[in-house]
Amino acid sequence: MADTNSSARNVIIFVADGLRNGSVNPIDTPTLYSIRQQGVNFTNSHSLFPTFTTPNASAIATGHYLGDTGDFSNTIYTGFPTPNASGSVTPFIENNAVLGDIDEKFPGNNFLDEESLLSYAREQGFNTAAIGKLGPVAIQDVTQVNREGGTAGSIPIPETVIIDDRTGAAANPTTSSPQAVPLDPDIVARLQAAGLPTTTPGRGANGNSGNNTTPGTTVANVDQQQFFIDAITKAVLPKFQEEDKPFVLVYWSRDPDGTQHNQGDSLNSLTPGINGDISKAGVKDADNNLKQLLDYLKSTGLDKTTDVFITSDHGFSTISKQVIDNQGTTTNSYAATQTYAGVNAGFLPPGFVAIDLAHDLGLPLYDPDKNTIAPLDISNIQYAVVDATQGQRPTAGNGVIGGSGQVINGKLDSGTKIVVAANGGSDLIYLPKGNADLAKQVVNLLSQKDYISGIFVDDAYGNIPGALPLSAIGLKGDAQTPTPTIVINFKTFSTDPNNPNNPQTEVEIADTSLQQGQGMHGSFGRGDTFNNMLAIGPDFKSSYVDYAPVSNVDVAPTLAQILGLDIPSNGNLKGRVIAEALVGGPDSVPFTQGTLTSQAATNGETTILNYQSVGNTQYFTAAGFGDRTVGLNTLDVDFGSTSSDDVTLKSKEILFTGDGADFVESTKGNTIQTGSGEDTVLVGSDSSVSAGD
């Protein structure tokens, strides 16, 4: 058991959802920028692919890759009809009641099948809290939102304080499942004493996403997030401090994510996209929350015993629904040739992958989020037919392809061939019957789509030309949930005429109900994988720049070491302790970089993966087809972190040289980041260089 006296360390994880590394600057984010100067600045940080919220929430929580946690995307195929998602087999899991539905199906009532930092700290006597955005907050200690007494049962008051969007909300009117996680009476009393509500305020106008003719929101999520940060600094932390026990607290700021998704700056236009004033207001909102938190720690003296780790779950990109490159080329997708209500002519509708696959294979398509009988009988459901020629599309983009579209006795019709879980910058494809020939056929079809950039296939299907295995990107492990058969990455490109690999101007094709010009993530482009990671506190070095690769999977192991916790594991896909960032740690750690290329598909396309390694821990920087992914280096060479390399770059390449004394010569449009060696860099026009020591 860990030491829980008053001299023990506390840790806070501050997650600024969707904050891009390049969005941190002295004007928009003075607090974050100051920590870059004063604390640890992780310059080579990574989100895990698929670059969505709940997958990275599971990694932050457990320190395990997604192949172990089974949280493969925000929307997954569960293998059963989900009560609190109206019987869908493809639920959106940023929902407490849905998480409870999924937990119930697995041993230990924990679909992640891993202990989290919060859960283990709680078991060892720490005070624990998770506050902020609905979904990822619960995932930090997921068993705490489980019901007793079945679907309509109740959630016991958890030991971990959980405050999210649904705090104080009524039960689901259809299933009677609670949506709110109850609060301890002492927390309720403290909120009231501080003049705060006990029901979370809504997002108001910030939740307005608009439509294809009306712009979305013009404001950040200020009111709701002010409630969350006030609850932390005026109720939760004062309680923890009075109880004189060490604590672990996670604050998950919905901004800038929610504002970047819904912003109304750029309806149907790729510029300014998510780089306009409204998105910047969302970034500023998160920074203000961080300032209030740090000010409280300093004013109470908690800063002397509290380490703060700051991260973002993923980066962000501007959505394209029609244009597939910076030359203005438009997609030739079959789905885009049809006419739909609420979708501009020639634009990709939500569900375009499902529509295209069903059309190509000559199979019927059904909508798993729309059924034709009362949803109370979720063991026997008929999903609605989707006929694109009649202007129909899947409600949420998900699709069941083949068979009758029925759920019979709680299982999908055995004739079902494919299930598509639509997510945004990438989609998941499942073959429930494990048909290897169909897998090859689907990969071949997808490799020909002009909106695809990279395909990954379950290792169980062997080598399929055009695709890399899921194990190459940490998606094949001990997961309890169904493993996707195929994961597809959508094309990304940059609107920066001077830098085709600029992650701040990344645009991505996205399978979403949001509009062109709004924001999305999920892709393998560097704009989505390049998150923001910082740390400050008594156990972290001061004014330290870390050039080694790090990712969200390293957060829990690093903080567990600080707290003296040895978290048990079931799976083996784990992150590392970021030793070089800790006081007394090494000055740096060696790392290598490499490129993995698949066998060519019939049309010649190959999936290329850029990765980095620190020991046995791998980091995935970018992946895709040739010139279809922002930040993808197609050079077939490895760069050592201590060796001296001579490299010549073609145009439009991105290179991290490592810590050796390297010589780099490049033509135009390159991005080069050097390590701590004495490097020589000769660049052509329109190139950018970030130098190490």
Image (tube, rainbow, N blue to C red):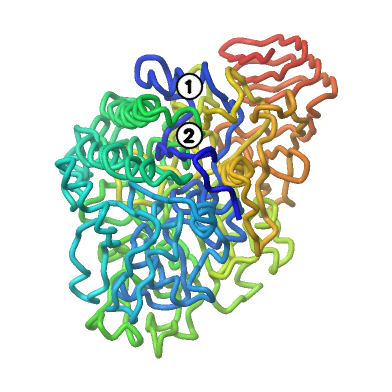
Task: Tell me which amino acid carries mark 1.
Answer: Ile
Task: Where is residue 217? Give x, y as percent.
Answer: 20, 37
Quadrant of the rendered image containing residue 548: top right
Residue occupied by mark 1: 35
Compare residues 660 and 133 and report the one nearer the observer.
133
Identify the residue at image location x=36%, y=60%: 397
Relative vertical location of residue 618 with respect to residue 667 in this rendering, above or below? below
Numbered label tally = 2
- For residue 88, above or below residue 624: below
Which amino acid does the dot numbered 2 rest on?
A: Ile
Badge 2 or badge 1: first in the primary sequence: 1
> Could you say which is closer to the camera, residue 146 or residue 494?
146
Compared with residue 364, is residue 291 higher up or lower down, i.e. above or below?
above
Under tag 2, what secondary structure?
strand
Q: Mark 2 to mark 1: distance in Å?
A: 9 Å
Disc sitting over residue 647 in the figure:
none
For the C terminus, give its image quadrant: top right
The picture places residue 236, in percent across and down from the top left corner, at 32, 45
User: Which disc, if any, is residue 310?
Assistant: 2
Is the residue under label 1 in contact with that under label 2 (CB below 8 Å)? yes
- Residue at 66% across, 62% down: 571
**The N terminus appears in which quarter of the rendering?**
bottom right
Q: Residue at x 78, y 29 (%)?
A: 639
